[in-house]
Image (cartoon, rainbow, N blue to C red):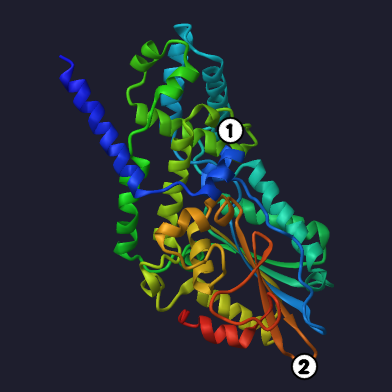
Amino acid sequence: MKRIPTIALLLLVAIGAAAQDFWKVDPGMEAALRADLTLSGTNHHPYIHGDLRDTPPPAGYKPFYISHYARHGSRHSWGDSYYVLILDVLQKADSLGILAPAGREALEQTREVVAAWDGMDGRLSQRGVREHSEIGHRMVHRFPQVFRGAPKIRSISSTVQRCIVSMNAMTTAVAADRPRVQWTLDTGERFMDYISHTGTKVPACREIQKPYKAHIWDAPCDSTQLLRTMFTDAAVARTLIPSLDRFHKALFRTATISGCWDIEDRILKSLPFEYVYRFCSYEQHDIMARYGHCAEIGQARFSPDDLLGRDFVQKADEAVAGGEYAVDLRFGHDYPMLYLCAWLGVEGPGSRLSVDEVDAKWHGWDMLCMGSNLQAIFYRNRKGHVLVKFLYQEQERALRGIESYSGPYYEWDKLRARIEGYKR
């Protein structure tokens, strides 16, 4: 009678051991997550800007043009199936009198998230509005020379609501600081060709992440902590949960989207830390393998005629040649954002890494959080020599495979020649 449970237990242990062999906990990532569990939301984490200090440009160089691409701000996720599961289980447990304080906190937090979502998938939150508004204010005050007088600014958005509202938030902030700005605002299906361009779809990219899904995302997880923490009667609670795996994932997804609505998380502390780490690790590997500069794929990842990169180069060339626009703003999505950084060689988000380096060097909460943005600031001296520096999350970033002119400043002519066709 005890043979089947014993075999099942041994199988779980074997699977767990296989998963442990497949991935290793990175000490740096572990320390970051233990200090702040909400970082595990990776690309669902609200915006975190980097170091805002500027390295002075070489003598005689002044900023004259900014080229920008931003992911929309904090938003909601999709569907309510996870919320329905959590509410069904926890409300039944409450009615039976077996809901512990931690379970009640999870119930209340889920109700808050459902109210914020209000049936609108992907809806930009007010925190997302603030994120782009604050980025706009900082851009104006950081580079006032670009915004002097009555400069013309061209702003293009994805047709998706959260991107349009993000554009509205940032342009309204800039207009408040510089009322004389002349605006060109637009969105439409034809812009989506480049605003949402994610490069070449290489089947091998998806294949790379499949084992991580099997060994990390879908690996069995110890449920004893959760049942013991959220309920006063673990045995009865277990009968209320149709799938422990899905229940864990539902709680994780609800917890990690909460910050986008300024809702304090009280759920993650009830989940096993191993589980929180694993989910974070899987999502980082999945994003990096499919949309970043994965070393195992190499140059095949990049389109021969890149639409988003070409738009970046063409508009910069226009500005360098004396074009009418002082700033180009683009508002899109996370995967095109990551692709553009990889194509340009922006260290950090666009670093060329093998998949086994991801947990140590590519943290989603920093590299692709909500509101992530790339700013290329162009400088010129009286002789017309043009330099450019890149900010990611508003922090100066080096470029891969090319020597700088000085500090984070690169010669535009040399950089342009290197990025055409992505030769690096």
Disc 1 secondary structure class:
helix
> In this view of the protein, can residue 135 be seen by the observer?
yes
User: Which residue occupies the foreground of this view, 236 or 26?
Assistant: 26
Q: Residue at x 48, y 38 (%)?
A: 276
Outermost residue, bottom side: 383
Pointer 1 residue: 116
Q: Residue at x 37, y 32 (%)?
A: 221
For the N terminus, which image quadrant?
top left
Q: Position of residue 71 (x, y in %)?
A: 57, 57
For marks 2 and 1, the one nearer the N-term is: 1
Count neighbours of disc 1 (C-alpha within 10 A) and say few if under 14, some if 14 to 19, many if 20 or more: some
Mark whose residue sits in front, 2 or 1: 2
Pointer 2 residue: 383
Image height of 105 relative to 335, above or below: above
Q: Position of residue 211 (x, y in %)?
A: 30, 51
Q: Splitting the image into 4 quarters, where does residue 288 fall? A: bottom left
Q: Which mark is residue 174?
A: none
Q: Amino acid at mark 2?
A: Lys
Q: Viewed as shown, does residue 188 lie left or right of 176?
A: left
Image height of 152 relative to 9, above or below: below
Q: Alpha carbon of mark 2 to alpha carbon of mark 1: how far?
A: 54 Å
Image height of 144 relative to 132, above or below: below
Count neighbours of disc 2 (C-alpha within 10 A) and say few if under 14, some if 14 to 19, many if 20 or more: few
Q: Position of residue 417 (x, y in %)?
A: 54, 87
Q: Residue at x 73, y 72 (%)?
A: 152
Q: Position of residue 363 (x, y in %)?
A: 53, 53
